[in-house]
Structure formats: C-alpha cells, structure tokens
Amino acid sequence: MPPVVIGVGTRLGRDDEIGLLLVERLVEAGEIDTDHTLSLEGADAADVATALLDLGRPALLADCADMGLPPGSFRGFDDHEARLRLRADAASTHGLGLADGLALARALGFAPPVRIFAVQPFDLSPAAGLTPEMEALLPDLVTAFGAELKRLKERDC
C-alpha cells in the first residue's frame, strides 16, 4: 500500500506554509498523485492523530518545526524519534505539537510506519507567503522531500 504524503502548516504564518508547499510541489512534479496526499492546514495534534487513524497506512508528514537548528535546515526521521528531534517547548506552530499527534495516534492503535520531514523556519510571523530565504531553498527542499518519500516507499511499502 503506498504511503500517504501529508502536508501540515498554515498559509498565514510565513514559513509555516512549507509543509503544504512541499506536498503540492511533489504532486506538480508527478512524483505522487493527489489520491495519496492530504493537506492539514491549521491542524493540531488531534487532527494529525485522526487523519492517521482514518487513513491507516504508512505516512510521510512535512511540517516546519523548531528543532533548534539553523533556519532552513531540515531533517527526516521516524515518528518514534519525534520527541528527541523536535524541541519540546516549540515542537509545532499548531497548538499541541506534531509529536503529540503522532503519540496519540500510536496510543490509539495506529501501527504503520511514519516518517517526518521537518524544516527549521526563518520566520513564523503572521503574514502570507514564505520568507525570501525559504523561497530560495524551496527547490532543494522539494528534492530532499522527494528522496525521503522514495526511501519510505523502498523500506516499508
């Protein structure tokens, strides 16, 4: 069963849009079809958990997250590493963090593999559109995100 690719973010928080855009760009590039994607705009932990439980299949999630790294840095990791990789005090820009949503889904019986592709933001101020710095990195981020999807497909699906 192919994984679902999930973009998490908001279009009104500058670089918080990155998760949504990464998924859109993979669709535009023909690397994944829209039947295997989901956009969780403005989602919180409960939304993430509900989506995973409803889908019941492997997933790759893209989101911006404060990992204490230089802005524009990215990391791909398994969901069980989320608490270690995402800063506990600022794991998400959406209510309870992404790590909390994954933990909730696991506690409720979600078993398929989940990979997270997290990008350290430059700016999360309330405004539309990526920062120019993040916009400049977008092609490289799309390439890295596509490679993460390919690894997940080869490994688990």
Image (cartoon, rainbow, N blue to C red):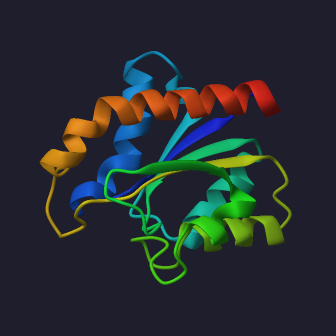
**Vertical order, 114 against 47 (above or below):** above
Residue 128 rendering spot, x and y as whole percentages: 15, 56
Which residue is rendered at x = 81% and y = 33% of the image?
Answer: 156
Give the total number of marks visible in the rendering.
Answer: 0
**Vertical order, 150 against 17 (above or below):** above
User: Left or right: 17 with respect to 40?
Assistant: left
Q: Is residue 24 visible?
A: no
Residue 8 found in image quarter: bottom left
Q: Quadrant of the N terminus?
A: top right
**Vertical order, 107 against 35 (above or below):** below
Q: Is residue 56 visible?
A: yes
Q: Quadrant of the C terminus?
A: top right
**Vertical order, 50 against 35 (above or below):** below
Which residue is rendered at x = 57% and y = 71% of the image?
Answer: 45
Residue 83 rendering spot, x and y as whole percentages: 65, 71
Q: Residue furthest top?
A: 30
Residue 125 rendering spot, x and y as whole percentages: 18, 70
59 and 151: which one is in front? 151
User: Left or right: 15 with respect to 5?
Assistant: left
Q: Residue furthest bottom?
A: 89
42 and 73: which one is in front? 73
Which residue is rendered at x = 56% and y = 27% of the image?
Answer: 147
Which residue is rendered at x = 25% and y = 67% of the image?
Answer: 124
